[in-house]
């Protein structure tokens, strides 16, 4: 299965946080699953690191992703177009992009955020 990890899922996994659910942890460590992290999540985590809201320096984040064979998912024009036209009241542009990427790349989205449940995204937590 292909798993797209939301920003908090990436952070909690890499830092060993107990906030990551046991289900999410099992999915992430299962070598049968392909792990993807969106450029959206990289941006968010690097921005938070710069503001000292997370304590994972960008260089360490990227090195940890490479060590764990996590594929970086770029934002394509198709993702952007789909995100702009999702019939969804949610206005957060980053969540809209994650939803579009999960849908178009046929990924389950690993996220605690229930806002994705109303639009047919396969959310795992």
Image: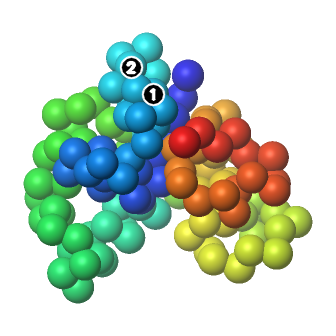
Relative image position of residue 92 (x, y in whole percent): 63, 77
Element under label 1? Answer: helix
Name, please, the residue furthest toward the right.
87
Residue 30, quarter of picture: top left
Left or right relative to 78: residue 38: left
Report the disc number at residue 125.
none
Left or right relative to 55: residue 84: right
Q: Residue at x 36, y 68 (%)?
A: 43
Left or right relative to 50: residue 23: right
Residue under pointer 2: 30
Q: How is the image coloured?
A: rainbow
> Looking at the image, is 20 positioned above or below residue 86?
above
Q: Residues within 10 Å of mark 1 (few under 14, many from 20)?
A: many
Element under label 2? Answer: loop
Instruction: Indicate the quadrant containing the N terminus: top left, top right, bottom left or bottom right.
Output: top right
Instruction: Indicate the quadrant containing the C terminus: top left, top right, bottom left or bottom right.
Output: top right
Report the disc number at residue 27.
1
> Looking at the image, is 100 positioned above or below residue 85?
above
Do residues under tags 2 and 1 come within 8 Å of each other at their CB atoms?
Answer: yes
Q: Is residue 84 visible?
A: yes
> Looking at the image, is 66 positioned above or below residue 86?
above
Q: Residue at x 43, y 14 (%)?
A: 32
Q: Residue at x 48, y 32 (%)?
A: 23
Q: Is residue 10 visible?
A: no
Separation of marks 2 and 1 at Cα, in angstroms? 5 Å
Residue 21, quarter of picture: top left
Q: Is 31 in front, or is 24?
A: 24
Relative image position of residue 79 (x, y in whole percent): 65, 56
């Amino acid at each position: 299965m292909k798993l797209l990890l939301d920003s908090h899922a990436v952070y909690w996994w890499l830092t060993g946080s107990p906030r990551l659910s046991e289900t999410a942890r099992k999915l992430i460590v299962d070598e049968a699953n392909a792990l993807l992290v969106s450029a959206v999540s990289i941006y968010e985590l690097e921005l938070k690191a710069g503001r000292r809201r997370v304590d994972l320096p960008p260089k360490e984040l990227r090195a940890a992703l490479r060590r764990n064979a996590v594929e970086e998912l770029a934002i394509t024009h198709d993702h952007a177009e789909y995100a702009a036209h999702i019939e969804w009241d949610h206005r957060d542009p980053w969540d809209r992009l994650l939803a579009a990427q999960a849908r178009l790349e046929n990924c389950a989205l690993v996220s605690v955020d229930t806002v994705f449940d109303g639009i047919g995204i396969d959310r795992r937590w």
